[in-house]
Amino acid sequence: MSTPTILLIEDEQHIAEGLIFNLEAEGYRVLWAQSGEEGLELLQREQVSLLVLDLMLPGISGYEVCRRLRTGNPRLPVLILSARAEERDRVKGLALGADDYLIKPFSLDEFLLRVRGMLKRAEWYQAKTVSELVFGDNRIDLRQGTATTARGELTLTEQELKLLRVLAERAGEVVDRTLLLKEAWGMRPETATRTLDNFIVRLRRYFEPDPARPRHFLTVRGRGYRLVLEPEKTA
């Protein structure tokens, strides 16, 4: 198995040096860029397994880096690191295609756990033989990461595919939040995050006829979510 390559785009040198030291101690190859423009150049030249991205950068922002990346590479796992702790900042980052969002200052153990989890899930997904998921007016190729919907064609991110896979394997069942966070993100059960909820909102926007009145991606209050492939018809 090849050594995973992690690209870190972070302009604060003391933060970058600490992360690089610990990531390399874990056995990863690390590339470092201090601006969004430099990071995008490295993404063109290098085979990267994971992008760790700061938002507040000189030149173009981390948001813009994520947007440009997703136009050509919908699958690369992206972990945002930012001091921006407000909900709207997290939602914006996730809406642009990031897979997870960690607020500065953060625990080094938590950071390394997120990295390991994202790399493991990416490897796990790529090794799977997967099939199509069909419901409503949607047909999703979980191998190619493409979908046909009532609104047209779209390409899914790696993290969207992981979440769909976990839900599809338990279609019709209530899937607890802790299980979804563990299997789709590799997070510990006690992790407090709105990442899962933001991803469910995104899937509803893609696949529900009326995202405000979901029929397929249902919330089970106090527990988690349930994927319903064939909702009961209403009179």
Image: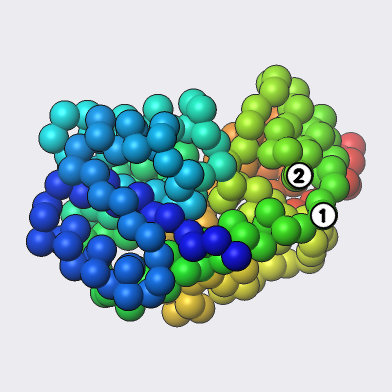
Residue at image x 37%, y 42%? 93
Whether residues under marks 2 and 1 lie with C-beta atoms below 8 angstroms apart, the answer is yes
Q: Position of residue 59 (x, y in %)?
A: 16, 29
Please tell me how crowded label 2 is: few (under 14), some (14-19), or many (20+) other residues with Cα within 10 Å: some
In the rendered image, the residue lying farthest to the top is 152
Is residue 198 among what the camera can see? Answer: no
The residue indicated by pointer 2 is 143
Locate the C terminus and report the quarter of the image it occupies.
top right
| Helix, strand or loop status at disc 2 | loop
Asked if residue 108 lies left or right of residue 12, the reply is right
Give the spatial CA distance, label 2 vs label 1. Answer: 7 Å
Q: Quadrant of residue 91?
A: top left
Q: Residue at x 45, y 79 (%)?
A: 190
Which residue was labeled with disc 1? 129
Indicate the colouring scheme.
rainbow
Q: Observer-nearest residue: 196 or 63?
A: 63
- Regarding residue 129, the answer to whether it shows in the image is yes
Question: What's the mark number on residue 216?
Answer: none
Position of residue 44 relative to residue 82, above or below, is above
Above or below, comparing residue 14 to residue 144 in the picture: below
Looking at the image, residue 122 sits to the left or right of residue 83; the answer is right
**As drawn, is 60 to the left or to the right of 185?**
left
Q: Position of residue 227 (x, y in %)?
A: 75, 54
Seen at 68% across and 57% down, the residue is 125
Closer to the chain start, of discs 2 and 1, is 1
The N terminus: image quadrant: bottom right
**Type of amino acid at the residue the image marks with label 1:** Thr
Which residue type carries mark 2? Arg
Horizontal relation, residue 29 to residue 165: left or right: left
Vertical position of residue 96 compared to residue 182: above or below: above
Which image quarter: residue 34?
A: top left
